[in-house]
C-alpha cells in the first residue's frame, strides 16, 4: 500500500547539546538553532506548503526570545512537541521522579509558551524504554515518536561512542537497546512491556522512517545528496503507510554561512552550505507532498482515535 500520509518533524536542539555530545566546552554555544535554523525551516515549510511539528527542549526557553519563537511557530499553524526539559541522553535510565520531571515539567512549560496542547513526545538520542513510554502516556501525551529502527545509525553511534572511550573522552550520549533494530517501520500500537514491539495499550508509536536502508532524516539527505535522497524517499512512499520524516534545526545552519564555532566541524553536515541543503530538503518535501497527505502528527493521532 502506498503511503497515504506523512509528517515532518524538527528537533530543535540548541547548539549547547552538540557541544555536550562531543564532550566539548559549551560556553561558546550560541542560540543559532533557534534564531537562524528555525526561521529557515519555517520558510522551507511555507514554500512547500506543509505543516510540521517542532520538538522543543523546555530548558532552551530560558534563553531570551525563545518563548516568543515557540508561540510564533504555533501561531503559524505548526505543532509544538515535547523534547524534554534538559535533553538528558540517559533519560531512559533515570529514576522515576527525575524521569517524570523531565517529561511532565517540559510539557507544562511548552504548553504555556505555545498556548496550545502539547501531545507528542520525542526522546533525546532516540533512546526509549517501557518505563519512559509509560511516563509519556501517563502525562497526557497522545503519541510517541522516539523509535528509530535504523541499523546504520545504530552501528555508527556504537562506533563513535567506542572511539571516544578509546580516546579517553566521555560523551553524554548512550547507545540504547539493540531491540530498536527489529521494531516495526510503520506506525504501531506498542506493547506495554516493550516499546519496540507491537502490542496492546502501550500507546501509539510513529517510528522515524527508514527506506531502502536510508533513514529519512536531514543528516542522511545531506550526506547522500539530492538524487539518492529522492530515490530513498520514493521507495518509502511506495512501501509505507506513513512516512515520518525528521530534521534537526541545525540541519539548516552552516559553519561558513553562519560563522559558527569551527569546533562544531565535528558535525560534518555543518560544513555543507545552507543553500545546498535547502535545495535537497525542498526536493524531498515537494515529492512527499505530491504523493501523500502531509499532516501534523497530533492531527493524525486524533483522526486515528476518532476512527477506532
Ligand atoms: Zn534532540
Image: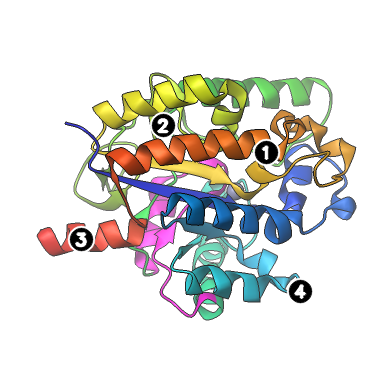
Residue for point 35% across, 44% down: 289
Q: Quadrant of the N terminus?
A: top left
Q: Are marks 1 and 3 in contact (CB under 8 Å)?
A: no
Cα gap from disc 4 to disc 1, whole angstroms: 28 Å
Cα gap from disc 2 to disc 3, whole angstroms: 27 Å
Q: Are marks 4 and 2 in contact (CB under 8 Å)?
A: no
| Colour convention of the picture | rainbow
- Disc on the earlier residue, 4 or 3: 4
Circle 3 residue: 303
Cα gap from disc 4 to disc 3, whole angstroms: 36 Å
Where disc 1 sits, the SS reads helix
Residue 118: say if magenta: yes
Q: Position of residue 90 (x, y in %)?
A: 60, 46
Q: Is residue 173 above or below residue 64?
A: above
In front of the other: label 2 or label 1? 1
Mark 1 C-beta to ligand 1 under 8 Å: no
Q: Are marks 4 and 1 in contact (CB under 8 Å)?
A: no
Say few, some or many: other residues with alpha carbon within 10 Å of mark 4 (under 14 / 14 to 19 / 20 or more). few
Say few, some or many: other residues with alpha carbon within 10 Å of mark 2 (under 14 / 14 to 19 / 20 or more). many
Circle 4 residue: 64
Cα gap from disc 1 to disc 3, whole angstroms: 36 Å
Residue for point 67% across, 38% down: 275
Circle 1 residue: 275
Of residues 84 and 43, which is closer to you in this image? 43
Where disc 2 sits, the SS reads helix
Q: Position of residue 149 (x, y in %)?
A: 41, 30
Among the 4 quarters of the image, the one containing residue 296 = bottom left
- Disc on the earlier residue, 4 or 2: 4
Circle 2 residue: 180
Amino acid at each position: 500500500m502506498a503511503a497515504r500520509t506523512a509528517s515532518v518533524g524538527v528537533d530543535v536542539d540548541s547548539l549547547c547539546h552538540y557541544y555536550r555530545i562531543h564532550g566539548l566546552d559549551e560556553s561558546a554555544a550560541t542560540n543559532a538553532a533557534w534564531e537562524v535554523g528555525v526561521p529557515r525551516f519555517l520558510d522551507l515549510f511555507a514554500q512547500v506548503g506543509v505543516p510540521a511539528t517542532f520538538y522543543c527542549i523546555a530548558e532552551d526557553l530560558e534563553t531570551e526570545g525563545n518563548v516568543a519563537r515557540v508561540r510564533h511557530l504555533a501561531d503559524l499553524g505548526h505543532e509544538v512537541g515535547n523534547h524534554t526539559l534538559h535533553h538528558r541522553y540517559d533519560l531512559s535510565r533515570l529514576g522515576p521522579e527525575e524521569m517524570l520531571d523531565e517529561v511532565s515539567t517540559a510539557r507544562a512549560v511548552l504548553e504555556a509558551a505555545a498556548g496550545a496542547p502539547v501531545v507528542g513526545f520525542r526522546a533525546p538520542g532516540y533512546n526509549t524504554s517501557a518505563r519512559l513510554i509509560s511516563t509519556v502516556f501517563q502525562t497526557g501525551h497522545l503519541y510517541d515518536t522516539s523509535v528509530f529502527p535504523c541499523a546504520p545509525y545504530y552501528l555508527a553511534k556504537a562506533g563513535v561512542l567506542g572511539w571516544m572511550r578509546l580516546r579517553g573522552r566521555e560523551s553524554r550520549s548512550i547507545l540504547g537497546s539493540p531491540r530498536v533494530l527489529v521494531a516495526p517501520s510503520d506506525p504501531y500500537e506498542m506493547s506495554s512491556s516493550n516499546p519496540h514491539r507491537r502490542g496492546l495499550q502501550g500507546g501509539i508509536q510513529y517510528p522515524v522512517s527508514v527506506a531502502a536502508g536510508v533513514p529519512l532524516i536531514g543528516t542522511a539527505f545531506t550526506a547522500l545528496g539530492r538524487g539518492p535522497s529522492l530515490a530513498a524517499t520514493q521507495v518509502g512512499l511506495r512501501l509505507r503507510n506513513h512516512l515520518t520524516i525528521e530534521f534537526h534545526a541545525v540541519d539548516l545552519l552552516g559553519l561558513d554561512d553562519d560563522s559558527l564555532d569551527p569546533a562544531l566541524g565535528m558535525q560534518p553536515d555543518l560544513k555543507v552550505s545552507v543553500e545546498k541543503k535547502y535545495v535537497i530538503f525542498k526536493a524531498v518535501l515537494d515529492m512527499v507532498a505530491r504523493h501523500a497527505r502531509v499532516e501534523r502528527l497530533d492531527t493524525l493521532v486524533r483522526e486515528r482515535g476518532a476512527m477506532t
